[in-house]
Image (cartoon, rainbow, N blue to C red):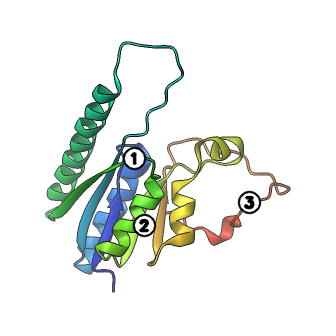
Amino acid sequence: MYHRILVPIDGSSASRRGLKEAIDFAKSLGGQLRLFHVASEQIVDCGYGGGTYGGELIELGRKEGRHVLAEAEVSVRREGLQAETVMVESMNVSAAASILTQAREWPADLIVMGTHGRRGLARLAMGSDAERVVREAPVPVLLVRDFSLPRPHVSHETTASAPEDQVLYV
């Protein structure tokens, strides 16, 4: 059924919650986990000058990515499982596009990922990688919402691309 489970992680509490659900799935189904991190090389230059150069930021992103993957791998091992870890560097490609590419190339049977549950202006400003993955994924996607974050009030008059009852939050 779901033997190859792709787990995008970014170190956030939402992605850690997604990892926990993916571990539970893998244990109950005998599945294989692939922990996936995107080290983004997109750098915002506001023109203020500064003390950190682009090359330093890129290397910091790589270092943080290795740390995030190592921490997640420890969580998996603590549960008696093994996991592959993959980090890709992304230049001008969204995290969602990288996740979708990885899901196709590996190939995954299921994607389990955390979501921040942003709505309204926050979603408009930050985008929604989870939403794009759900819309374009070649396999089922399980979104795991981080309920430790405050849930914004959703007005019935608000238009959204997917009604609340069509998105599965665990």
> Mark 1 to mark 2: distance in Å?
15 Å
Q: Residues within 10 Å of mark 2 (few under 14, many from 20)?
A: some
Mark sitting on residue 160: 3
SS at badge 3 = loop
Residue 39: x and y in percent read 33, 45
Q: Is residue 92 left or right of residue 38?
A: right
Q: Is residue 164 above or below residue 87?
A: below
Q: Residues within 10 Å of mark 1 (few under 14, many from 20)?
A: few
| Residue at x 28%, y 64% (from the top left corner) | 23
Residues marked 3 and 1 touching at CB (< 8 Å): no
Q: Furthest-right residue in view?
A: 157
Mark sitting on residue 100: 2
In the rendered picture of this protein, how many numbered marks are placed on residues? 3
Q: Is residue 9 above or below residue 49?
A: below
Q: Is residue 19 above or below residue 120?
A: below
Mark sitting on residue 170: none
Instruction: Choose mark 2 or mark 3, whichever is in front.
Output: 2
In the foreground, 33 or 137: 137
| Residue at x 53%, y 71% (from the top left corner) | 136
Which numbered disc, 3 or 1, marks the residue that appears first in the sequence? Answer: 1
Q: Amino acid at mark 2?
A: Leu
Q: Is residue 58 above or below residue 46?
A: below
> Mark 3 to mark 1: distance in Å?
29 Å
Instruction: Choose mark 3 or mark 1, whichever is in front.
Output: 1
> Mark 2 to mark 3: distance in Å?
22 Å
Q: Quadrant of residue 7?
A: bottom left
| Residue at x 35%, y 27% (from the top left corner) | 54
Mark sitting on residue 91: 1
Task: State the quadrant of the N terminus.
Answer: bottom left
Q: Is residue 36 left or right of residue 114?
A: left
Q: Amino acid at mark 3?
A: Ala
